[in-house]
Each structure stands twice: as structure tokens, then as C-alpha cells.
Amino acid sequence: MIHDRSHALFARAAELLPGGVNSPVRAFKSVGGEPFFAARALGPHLFDVDGNRYIDYVGSWGPMIAGHAHPQVLDAVARTMRDGLSFGVPNALEVEMAEAISRIVPSMEMLRMVNSGTEATLSAIRVARGATGRSRIVKFEGCYHGHGDSFLVKAGSGALTFGLPNSPGVPKALADLTLTLPYNDFDAATALFDEVGEEIAGLIIEPIVGNANCILPREGYLQHLRDLCTRHGALLIFDEVMTGFRVALGGAQQRYGITPDLSTFGKIIGGGMPVGAYGGRRDLMRQVAPSGPIYQAGTLSGNPVAMAAGLATLELIQAPGFHAALEAGTNALCDGLEAIAREAGVAFHTTRAPAMFGLYFREGPVETFEDSAASDPKRFGRFFHAMLDRGVYLAPSAFEAGFMSSAHGEAEIAQTLEAARGAFAEVAA
Ligand code: PLP
């Protein structure tokens, strides 16, 4: 494959953008090499500026669950933008969006639109702190909730250890308020709440972890967290920026039958435009400005063009059988990859939820962050490049989940498995 144009653009970009990119994982740092620059995208495919075509399992990191450049989404955007790009006063599409989200996710009794997942999670913990009058929050090792200061904290040696900031620029005083737990560990959560439960404003979790590859909750784990939060008066916050509208129409909360107090969304509800949302219990959300004192605002929040793209996407995913087909496709892909790896003699394991999967260069099971982190990153890097050379784009990091879209049909899955045959043979060599 020729990458001359991408290479030239990356050299120009590196002069002005840190690492040549506007978001770190795009730079291919953890798999080596250089990113390709997209020229356009259609259905399951990305096309780069050198004319190469890739079957895309990143889907712009989640929004493109109906495939790229879906005509219904593009039409909605085109229709809406003719009336103006932003009004700064309320518009009907914001109301339609709120009604759609609240109908599909009943725990979202009241909500606020924002412009990114990061804004959604930042705002949700502000509500948790404002409503409870408490300062501490709990997050999980390996869970990513955007780049807000309070979330850029990694675990200390035990659940009760104060968090250490893992980015310069995050004040220690703020990081101290973030407690970190090991995901899927029942006892650690119980012990933490026994110790400091009355000081915890909220516990935020990716109900299925998609930012440490892909880790599913153990049976009863999310209910355990629900019970602990209820018992200690802390708010349970589901960060469904990734899982929302993906692992079931109503997200992970529907799939696992848990009702969080607050939830955050992004990605799919913007259909490819910059959108996020947070919301939940009416008594909590009524405390947000201007109906209450907890301040949060946004110049472009509820942007009409973004609402149009999101609403069109939400309509597409409500088609009967939409998620069942995605689940079948995800299973076919993962089963196929496991079988080919076995034939090639490569230690390999997959985890999966509908439209979301993890690839591991190790034997299963994978249930904890340690399990996930024990995947062989060198092998993943080689596999990634071997697949890319064969026209398949996987997430360029061993710590990111892969995504399926409804545009990935049997043909694309067959082509992916064919590419994997060669790629696993390379990795095995
Ligand atoms: N929460 C989760 C679970 C995410 O996966 C992400 C981004 O990948 C975010 C929050 C942050 O969203 P954004 O990148 O839109 O700020």
C-alpha cells in the first residue's frame, strides 16, 4: 500500500499539532508507524488520501453504528443546515432529542445536551457533588471518562489509596478526591464503601469497559454497585458514552437491568457530530441551572445540525432487529478470529457485547484490568499492521474496544477473516 500523501500530511501536521493529531490515540503511538489521513468514508469503509480502502472497525470511535455517511443522516444534516448552523436560542430538535433519549432510556427522566462525552461526565460528577454535598468520587482502574481532571487518576496500590494524577497538570488536591477501585472486584467495592461510603458523592463506571480493551461485568457486579450506592447515599453514574444505544437499544442499563441515578452519553447520539448528554433522576437534574443552582452551560449545546444527525441515527437504530443483527455479526467475526488463531497456533481470545469487541493476544478468560493488561502488546501491534496492510482498520491500540456497524455485512466479515488468516500466520511466525 502506498501512503505518500498521508506521510506528507503527517509531516505538516507534526509541525503544528502535538504529535500530529487532535486526539492522542490517532497517532498510532502504541502500535508504531504513522496514521493514514482519511479522505472520505462510506458504509463500512474508510478511504485514505492515497486511495486505499479499509474495512473500518473503529467507526470514528463509536458514533458510526449505522455505517459512515448513511444517506438518511446526511439528508437530515443537509436539510437542517440550510436553515442556519446555530441559533443560540432553543430549537425544536433539542426537544425531539430529549424526548427520544428519555423514551429509549427511561432512567433519563430529565437531561441536558452538551458537546462531548467529556463534558457529559464532568457535568454528571458536578451534579453528584452538588446534590449530595459530598466531594469524593469513585472510578475504576482502566475506565476512561474523558479528559476531565478528576478522571485522569490511576489506582494506587489499594482501593483506599488516594489517587495519583497520571497527567501533569492535574492538581494533587483534586486527584485526592478520586478513589479508584479494581473493576469486577466485589469485595474491594464493599470495603471502600464500608470505610468512606458516607463521603462518596458518586461512583462512575463504564458498565462494560471499552477503554481497557473490552471487559464485561461479572454476574451481579453492577447490581452489587447499585446496592452499595443506595445503602450509602452515593449516586450511581453509568458512563454509557460508549455502550449507550450500542449493546442494546437502551444501552448497558437495559442489557443488565440496572437503573443508575445519572447516565452519560455521547458518540451515537451525535451520529458523527460533536454531541454528549447527561441526565437521570428528575429530582437531581432539576438542580441544574437555570432551574437549580448547579451551574453548567454551553454556547453550541443542542446545536440543530448535530441534533439532526443524532436523531436520524437514533431512528435508524430503532429498526426491528437492528441490535440482534449487530450481535450476530460481532459473534461471527469474533468466533471466526478465534478459530483462525487456533489453527495458526496463536494464543488469542475475544470478548464481546453486541457491536463491541475486545481482541486479546493471550488465553482467556479476561475479567479484570490485570487480565486485560496482560495481553501481548507487541503481538497486537504486529497483528494490527498485518491487518492494515490487508485493508482492515482495527483500533490502533491494544486498550481500545473494536466496533461493528450495521453496514458490516457478511462480505466484509468474510474479507476480514480472510485478512486475519494471513495476519495470524505473520504473527505466529
Ligand atoms: N466516556 C467514555 C466511556 C468514553 O469512551 C469516552 C471517549 O471515548 C468519553 C467518556 C469521552 O468522550 P469524548 O471523547 O467525546 O469527550
Image (cartoon, rainbow, N blue to C red):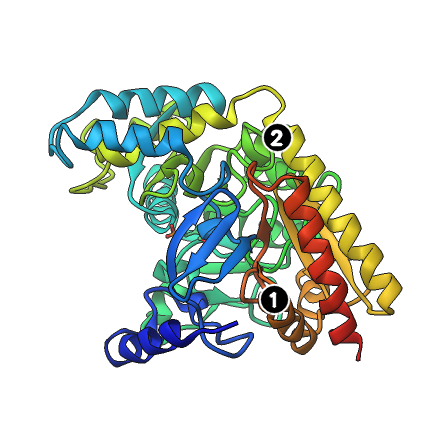
Residue at 87 percent across and 62 percent down: it is 342
Q: Amino acid at mark 1?
A: Ala
Where is residue 233 drawn, in percent x and y?
A: 50, 37
Instruction: Find residue 199 and report its horizontal and vertical position in percent.
Output: 46, 49
Up/down of 267 relative to 310, above or below: below
Element at label 2: helix
91 left or right, relative to 260: left
- Which quadrant of the structure image shows residue 183? bottom right
Residue topped by disc 2: 323
The residue at 32%/65% (across/down) is: 22
Q: Kindly tell me whether residue 141 is visible in this rendering.
A: no
Is the Cβ of the residue at disc 2 closer than 8 Å to that at disc 1? no
Q: In this orientation, which residue lies closer to the viewer: 237 or 252? A: 252
Which percent across, then down, holds residue 56?
A: 53, 53
The part of the image, by quadrant, that contains residue 10 is bottom left
**285 sits left or right of 219 in the view:** left
On the picture, is 347 further left or further right than 236? right
Q: Which quarter of the figure is the C terminus placed in?
A: bottom right
**Residue located beneath label 1 in the image:** 398
Indicate whether 153 appears above or below 41.
Answer: below
Query: Label 1: how many residues lie within 10 Å, few (<14), some (14-19) or many (20+)?
Result: many
Whether residue 53 can be seen here: yes
CA gap, disc 2 to disc 1? 25 Å
Question: Counting other residues with Cα less than 10 Å from the Cα at mark 2, is it few (<14), some (14-19), or many (20 or more)?
Answer: many
**Mark 1 residue element:** loop
The percent coordinates of residue 299 (x first, y second) are: 15, 42
Label 2 near ligand 1 (CB < 8 Å): no
In depth, the one of 287 and 254 nearer the eye is 254
Check the image and report above or below for 121 versus 233.
below
Mark 2 or mark 1, earlier in chain: 2
What amino acid is at disc 2?
A: His
Toward the viewer: 362 or 343? Answer: 343
